[in-house]
Amino acid sequence: MNYTTKAIIIQKTDWKESSAIVQCFSLDLGFISFIAHGLKQANNPNQDAIQLYNELELKLTKGANAELYVLQNCFVVNRYSQNSSFKQLVCLSAAIELLRNIYISDEEINNVYNYTKRFFLFSKTIESLYLVYFARFSINLLRIINPHITSIPCDYCQSEKNQIVAFDENDRAACNLCSKDIIHADTIEMLDSTLSFILYYPNSFWSMIENLQENELFINHFKRLLNKLFVVHYNKPIKLKALDLYY
């Protein structure tokens, strides 16, 4: 059976003497792997195209009982990693890690793919605040799948109605009411103001972008917040390893 789809290349592994198994995130099929026969041969026309974070239009085939697709041909749509800085590449890698950790239904694949593509395209146009934009992408991506993703219960009063404004040393979330009772405790950290803005005021992001800041506190709080969102809504922790390289 033949398939045509767009896809972002996320991993390439040598296979046999001259071929490769390629993993990608595709517009129509989600995460898939395909065999690129003869890819390592010097005269293979697909060598330049099949590079990390390139978006390709793929023509694939798959037998009735086959586990993997087989590449027929492809051409480049976008080269997202070309001329990118190290921090930009870290955020692209973290975006793929995030996608791997969420369940994407067949109905959501197109929206998730297109929003990811928008972020990859946008990342080529910016020169700073890469992680601020990545945090916004992450939270908005999760909202596509679950509109209530930012509802985090306070670990002190169990209410979901109030904004989370702090974490204690055990990563327990405190709402704006409960934090007043523990604000002088040595174990409490107020949520980074930029992260709080991204989380609770998404419609005002662009009007306030010049006032947002990125630092080690921001990345630390973003990691803790993202983990909290996954524990609450997906019943599992998350750690994006790529972000450890950011600072």
Image (spheres, helix red, strand yellow):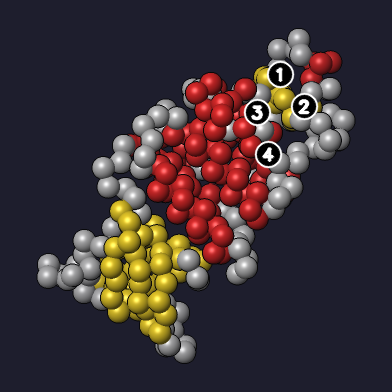
What separation in Å lies between label 4 and label 2 (alpha carbons)?
12 Å
Answer left or right for 170 relative to 35. right
Helix, strand or loop under label 3? helix
Which quadrant of the view contains residue 15? bottom left
The residue indicated by pointer 1 is: 188
> Where 51 sits versus 32, above or below?
above
Label annotation for residue 196: 3
Q: Indicate the quadrant containing the C terminus: top left, top right, bottom left or bottom right.
A: top left
Answer left or right for 242 relative to 236. left
What separation in Å lies between label 3 and label 2 (alpha carbons)?
13 Å
Point out the tag, 3 or 2, that comes first from the N-terminus: 2
The residue indicated by pointer 4 is: 228
**Closer to the camera, 178 or 140?**
140
Point out the tag, 2 or 1, that comes first from the N-terminus: 2
| Discs 3, 4 touching: Cβ within 8 Å | no
Q: Residue at x 40, y 48 (%)?
A: 121
| Discs 1, 4 touching: Cβ within 8 Å | no
Q: Looking at numbered disc 4 in the image, what kind of residue is underneath it?
A: Lys
| Discs 2, 1 touching: Cβ within 8 Å | yes
Q: Position of residue 111 (x, y in %)?
A: 56, 60
Q: Indicate the quadrant containing the N terminus: top left, top right, bottom left or bottom right.
A: bottom left
The residue indicated by pointer 2 is: 174
Q: Position of residue 242 (x, y in %)?
A: 44, 41
Point out the tag, 1 or 4, that comes first from the N-terminus: 1
Q: Residue at x 25, y 62 (%)?
A: 49
* Camera sees residue 173: yes
Label 3 crowd bin: few (<14), some (14–19), many (20+), radius 10 Å: many
